[in-house]
Amino acid sequence: MDKRQFITGGLAVGAASLLANSVSTAGILKSDGAFGKDGKYSLPKLPYAYDALEPYIDRQTMELHHDKHHAGYVRGLNNAIEKVSNAINSKDFSLIKHWEGEIAFHGAGHFLHTIFWNNMGPSQGKRSEKLEMMLKQSFGSYNNFMNLFIEASSKVEGSGWGILAYEPIGKRLLVLQAEKHQNRSPWAAIPILVIDVWEHAYYLKYQNKRKDYVKAFFNIINWDDVSERLEWAMK
C-alpha cells in the first residue's frame, strides 16, 4: 500500500466511525475483536459456546445469528469502505449516497452485534455500584428500568434494537429504540446494553412472541460487561 492509498483508506475508515445516528466505536470497549490486524473489520469470536445461553437462546439461533447474519454485516461494511476509498481515489462520487448508507447500515449492524454478544453470558455477574446508582438516578429503580426496557424493546417497529445508553451531556442513562440498526438514536448516546429484536434473533424459539424473548434476555445479561462499559463511557 503506497502513501496515497494509506491516507485515502484511512479517510474511508474514518468515515465509518461517523455512523448515522449514533452507533459508534465509542460503544465498544477494547474493540471486542471487531477490527482485525489486516486493517479490515472482522467477525469477533463468541466469548462462550453456541449452546451456552440455553434454554433462553438456542444453539441453532446462535450459530445462524453469529456465523451468517453478523458475518454478513462485516462483509458489507468492508465492501462499503473499499467502495468509498475507490470513490475518493477516482473522484467519482456518483454512488456515494448509496455507499455511505451501506457504511451506516452494515457498520451499525456490526458494532451493535459485537456489543450484544458480550452483553450476554452464561454467568450474569453483578451490577456495579455505579451502574445501580445510575439506574436509580435515571429511572427511579432497577425494576422501573427493566419494565421500560422490556416494553420499549418489545415495541420497536419492524426490526431493530432495544438499547440502554449513557448520554454524556445530561450524564444520564436512556432507554432507546433503534429501527433497523441506525435510525432514531441521538448522536451523543453511547450504547452499554443492547438487545437484537430482529426476528432472526429469536424466531426459531419464540416465533412471534418477541416480549417473551425480551423477558428471557434478562436471565443472560452479563452485568459485569455492562458495568465495565458504563465506567468507560462515563470517562
Image: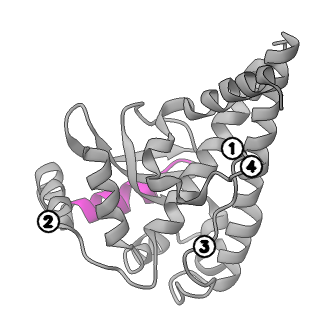
Question: Mark 1 belongs to which amino acid?
Answer: His
Disc 1, SS: helix
- In this view of the protein, can residue 235 be seen by the observer? yes
Q: Residue furthest front?
A: 2
**Type of the residue with mark 4:** Asp
Q: Position of residue 146 (x, y in %)?
A: 28, 65
Q: Which mark, by number, is residue 106?
A: 1
Where is mark 2, residue-wise?
A: 129
Query: Which one is earlier in the sequence, the residue at label 2 or at label 3?
Result: 3
Residue behind mark 4: 38
The one nearer the camera, 75 or 39, is: 39
Binning the other alpha carbons within 10 Å of mark 1 as few (below 14), some (14 to 19) or many (20 upward) gives many
- Vertical placement of 115 versus 27: above or below? below
Pointer 3 residue: 46
Magenta region: 145-157
Whether residue 202 sits left or right of residue 140 in the image: it is right
The residues tagged by marks 4 and 3 sit, at their Cα atoms, a distance apart of 20 Å
Find numbered disc 2 in the image and state the secondary structure of the residue it sits on: helix
Label 1 vs label 4, nearer the camera? 4
